[in-house]
Amino acid sequence: MSKEKSKNEINQHKEEALNKLNKLLDKLINSNSPSKADKLAYWFEDYARLLESEDSVTSFNSYKRGDVIKAELGFNIGSEQGGLHYCIVLANSSPYQKVVQVVPLTSIKPHKNLKKLRYGEINIENELYLLLKVKNDILENQYQEQCADIERISDSLSAEEYEARHKAARINLDRSKRVKREINRMKLGSIVLVNQITTISKLRIVDPKNNNSVLYNIRISNNSLNKIDEKIVEMFTKREH
């Protein structure tokens, strides 16, 4: 059993680690890929933020199998998926569970040969894009209907009622704008990376955090989930398929 280090030893280790990190960052900044230094610095900032919030969070959101989330996967090594990524939840997770099992998504690049996917990859085409598009259409229609109703009965509304109805309408308008911004940032197609299945802390989840979030209630189809199940069985079990 290893002896517990003293505070002086830990401080010395800290200084050595920070020195190595600074040297690495300086090296990357002066290399042909300075963006790696920026990503690494962001990763340490996020890591520190998550550690600081870890003890203060006592309850977590629940997630259902098939939910689409956006999570900060951290700094990647080699071909690992890192940074902010869409992921698909693989199993139901209650508010009392601190972790969730997911598979990351990656966008379809222009040069990608969809007839020759890598082992463990599944093409779900533009399913996520269409799900968000439908959500945005619903929100826009709700906003327009709310405005029309307000206009129709405006003469019978008190000032307080008028403002309350406009406030409710503006909530849907704000939701629509945020969904639209997300759509505009997306590529049309997505690939599921079953070969990078992982368990993450719910603290890493950026969206959805509540029912106003962009990805709230966005869930992929049973058909896509079945394809993921089949690939998991193929890759990680001895069952014949």
Image (cartoon, grey):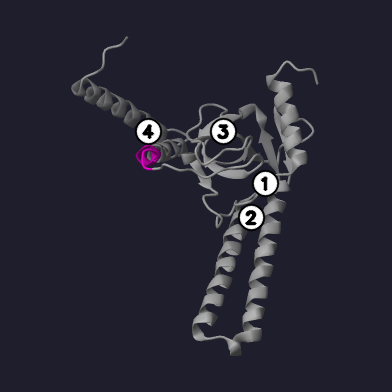
Q: Amino acid at mark 1?
A: Arg
Q: Quadrant of the N terminus?
A: top left
Q: Mark 4 = which residue?
A: 25
Q: Tag 2, which secondary structure?
A: helix
Per the image, is 178 magenta?
no
- The first of marks 2 and 4 along the sequence is 4
Asked whether residue 119 appears in the rendered view, the answer is no
> Disc 3 vs disc 1: which is toward the camera?
1
Quadrant for residue 64, please give it. top right
Q: Amino acid at mark 3?
A: Gln
Q: Mark 2 = which residue?
A: 183
Q: Which residues are magenta?
A: 48-56
Q: Nearer the viewer, residue 100 or 231?
A: 100
Quadrant for residue 190, please give it. top right
> Disc 1 vs disc 2: which is toward the camera?
1
- The first of marks 3 and 2 along the sequence is 3
Q: Tag 1, which secondary structure?
A: loop
Expressed as whole percent of the image width and height from the top left, the position of residue 41 reads: 39, 38
Q: CA distance from mark 4 to mark 1?
A: 39 Å
- The first of marks 1 and 2 along the sequence is 2
Q: Mark 1 = which residue?
A: 219
Q: Amino acid at mark 2?
A: Ile
> Callout 1 environment at 10 Å: few (<14), some (14 to 19), or many (20+)?
many
Vertical relation: 132 (above or below) 121:
below
- Residue 90's disc is none
